[in-house]
């Protein structure tokens, strides 16, 4: 039992937490065991104080210490295509010293590539550990003209992460309705199209992303319109319902998640200004947390509002900043 | 052995405690994906779609849309280097798309585009249905510059764009940015089966119409003295109880019909049981004593309804018949309630046949929605 507990301690103390959920996992092993979907990213002459050669080489004395990586994504060691990152530059294709990419004087690139749709490769250099990354590729004696070793050999680590790009966006329905508007009481649209005398959710918007800059959601479109007749958009400031006058507006609540509704749509009143469209209604951070926004629509008319079937087409658009 | 057993037990508990503490500490303090990007990663990438001219859809599947692509290039773009845009998810770049459909800005300043790079002019080629390639001319883009690329009808530099990119299928479209300039990046664009919420509302038709009195009286008409006007109360067999123009009754009408309403009158002039008639006035005519005259006129107050000719002027007229309805008032659109004050005039000649004369007038309000 005590040995089991010691093992647990060792695993959790000396293994970066990100390994537990890693999209990318690397270790230094022999070329012969780096099979079954694993990919060799670099070959080394030893586990410490070693020279390096590119994975395209096959010198026998570099076969016992290879940087071997696996992932649920389709990774490779290609230095071409639309999605790869150079994690080190070598002085030659074999028997080489290594430098960090920013120095950029060695001509031979060692790369991590990924052909899975939308994956983002991140490579970085960090002292002591690769906390915050998926995995440690290797370690270096210096930033330039370095010999290399396995992940524990030197303080300067070469780290990498593969993050699937995520942006989700959906509307719960594409049609909502007020039913029959009234000049003596406010109406609220619902998904059944029949409307309600009390404020109700018309539809939801769901959104999430892991984009570093998060996302924004905007609305664009027109106010309720029937031929040349319109029900006035309520305006760009949050306004409470007022029966007997023409009003069309929207507001939103956050049902769950970390996103926020943008002013002027966040308060208890309603807003919609056709002179200032598209208009941002919500935004969220790149935390990959799905936020559900509950959207509500207000409709009021005057006694002289022309009769007819009114329609407003509202386009919702999400944009991520990656 | 017993003591050793206790020690083992205590050690086991101790190490279990450490294990739990280690888990808690690691879980609580581990940095949450604090990425450090390298120099060749584009930053602040976005692609904002917008509707094509005359449409509302932007992120709808299989629909054309404009693109505004922005990114910051840490490395810059040297002379002769390329920037390549590659879309996936069945996105389709119009086969007709050329540099004239595209704008490229370096830090907000438009560069000149052409089919091929020449000196400071960039070349733009639709390489395939999913790829667009930009080739720099001789002007370098400085590291850290913000590149903005507009594709579609939103591209207005040099010429306004015509051709666009058609969205792929519902899901996530990826736009890869690469090229010999060395920086790379990927943008995700959500594509929906339908990106529009249609909001419907009904404004029900309303119409109000009323006649204040259904029976009016002239009394005994006469050929001398004064003209006679009808009144709401029965005066009995007295000659012309009302000798000045007076409201006989009123009509109220209102509607929210988009094309308003029309009020008509239908019925004969004053007619006796023997079939004799008081001659109706065919045009708007002022009262004249001693001749047969039957006519009506109206004043309008409130709302936006108006009296129709020939019943609007100061004189009187009556052009309806038992079989022909004639409009006496209308509105051209939604109108609050208008009150039409009805005045009835009658004069007779000395030889007008004696008798009890009656006219039955039917007023009808019709709205057009």
Image (tube, rainbow, N blue to C red):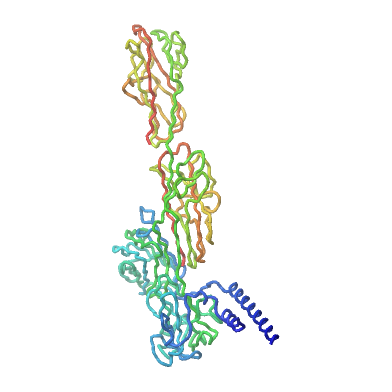
The residue lying toward the viewer, choosing from B176 and B114, is B176
- B3 displayed left or right of A158: right
**Residue for point 43% across, 77% down:** A85
Check the image and report above or below for B228 versus A19. above
Query: Can residue A105 be seen?
Result: no
- A121 displayed left or right of A128: left
Give the image location of residue B351, x and y in percent: 34, 6
Query: Residue B266 appears in which quarter of the rendering?
Result: top left
Q: In this view, which residue lies farthest toward the bottom?
A: A61
**Residue for point 47% across, 80% down:** A102
Position of the N terminus of chain B by quadrant: bottom right
Give the image location of residue A109, x and y in percent: 42, 82
Query: Residue A74 appears in which quarter of the rendering?
Result: bottom left
Q: In this view, which residue lies farthest toward the front?
A: B2
Give the image location of residue A10, x and y in percent: 58, 82
Position of the C terminus of chain B by quadrant: top left
The residue lying toward the viewer, choosing from A271 and A129, is A129
Query: Can residue B83 be seen?
Result: yes
């Amino acid at each position: 039992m005590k040995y089991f507990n010691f093992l647990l301690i060792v695993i959790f103390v000396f293994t970066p937490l990100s390994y537990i959920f890693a999209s990318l996992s690397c270790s230094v092993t022999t070329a012969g065991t780096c099979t079954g979907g694993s990919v060799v990213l670099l070959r080394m002459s030893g586990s410490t104080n070693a020279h390096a050669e590119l994975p395209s080489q096959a010198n026998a004395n570099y076969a016992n210490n290879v940087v071997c990586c696996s992932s649920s994504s389709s990774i490779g060691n290609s230095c071409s295509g639309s999605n790869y990152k150079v994690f080190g530059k070598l002085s030659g294709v074999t028997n080489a010293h290594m430098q960090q990419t920013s120095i950029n004087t060695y001509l031979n690139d060692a790369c991590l590539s990924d052909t899975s749709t939308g994956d983002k490769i991140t490579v970085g250099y960090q002292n002591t550990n690769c906390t915050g990354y998926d995995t440690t590729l290797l370690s270096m004696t210096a930033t330039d003209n370095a010999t290399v070793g396995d992940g524990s050999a030197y303080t300067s680590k070469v780290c990498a992460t593969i993050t699937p790009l995520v942006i989700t966006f959906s509307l719960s329905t594409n049609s909502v309705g007020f039913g029959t508007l009234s000049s003596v009481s406010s109406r609220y649209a619902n998904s059944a199209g029949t409307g309600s005398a009390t404020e109700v959710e018309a539809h939801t918007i769901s959104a999430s992303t892991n984009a570093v800059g998060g996302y924004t959601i905007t609305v664009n479109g027109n106010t309720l319109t029937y031929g040349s007749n319109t029900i006035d958009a309520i305006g760009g400031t949050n306004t409470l319902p007022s029966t007997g006058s023409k009003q069309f507006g929207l507001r939103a609540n956050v049902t769950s998640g970390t996103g926020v509704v943008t002013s002027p749509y966040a308060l208890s009143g309603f807003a919609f200004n056709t002179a200032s469209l598209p208009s941002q209604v919500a935004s969220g951070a790149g935390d990959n947390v799905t936020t559900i926004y509950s959207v509500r629509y207000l409709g009021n008319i005057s006694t002289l509002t022309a009769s007819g079937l009114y329609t407003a087409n509202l386009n919702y658009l999400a944009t991520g900043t990656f | 052995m017993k003591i050793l057993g206790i020690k083992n037990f205590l050690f086991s508990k101790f190490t279990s405690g450490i294990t739990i503490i280690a888990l808690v500490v690691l879980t609580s303090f581990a940095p949450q994906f604090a990425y450090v990007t390298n120099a060749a990663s584009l930053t602040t990438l976005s692609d904002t779609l917008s509707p094509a001219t005359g449409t509302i859809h932007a992120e709808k599947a299989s629909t054309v849309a404009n693109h505004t692509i922005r990114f910051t290039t840490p490395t810059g773009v040297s002379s002769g280097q390329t920037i390549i845009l590659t879309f996936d998810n069945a996105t389709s770049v119009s086969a007709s798309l050329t540099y004239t459909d595209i704008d490229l800005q370096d830090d907000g300043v438009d560069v000149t585009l052409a089919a091929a790079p020449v000196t400071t002019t960039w070349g733009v080629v639709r390489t395939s249905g999913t790829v667009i390639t930009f080739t720099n001319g001789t002007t370098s883009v400085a590291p850290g510059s913000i590149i903005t690329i507009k594709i579609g009808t939103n591209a207005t530099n040099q010429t306004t764009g015509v051709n666009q990119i058609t969205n792929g299928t519902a899901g996530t479209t990826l736009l890869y940015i690469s090229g010999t300039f060395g920086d790379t990046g990927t943008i995700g664009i959500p594509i929906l089966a339908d990106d529009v919420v249609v909001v419907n509302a009904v404004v029900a038709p309303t119409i109000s119409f009323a006649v204040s009195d259904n029976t009016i009286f002239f009394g005994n008409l006469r050929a001398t003295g004064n003209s006679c006007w009808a009144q709401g109360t029965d005066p009995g067999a007295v000659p012309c109880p009302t000798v000045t123009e007076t409201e006989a009754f009123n009509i109220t009408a209102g509607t929210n019909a988009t094309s308003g309403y029309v009020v008509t009158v239908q019925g004969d002039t004053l007619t006796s049981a023997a079939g004799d008639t008081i001659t109706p006035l065919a045009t708007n005519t002022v009262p004249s004593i001693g001749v047969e005259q039957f006519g009506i006129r109206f004043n309008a107050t409130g709302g936006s309804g108006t009296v129709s000719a020939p019943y609007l002027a100061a004189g009187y007229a009556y052009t309806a018949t038992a079989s022909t309805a004639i409009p006496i008032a209308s509105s051209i659109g939604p109108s609050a309630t208008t009150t039409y004050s009805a005045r009835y005039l009658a004069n007779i000649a000395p030889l007008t046949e004696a008798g009890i004369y009656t006219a039955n007038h039917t007023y009808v309000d019709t709205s057009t929605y």
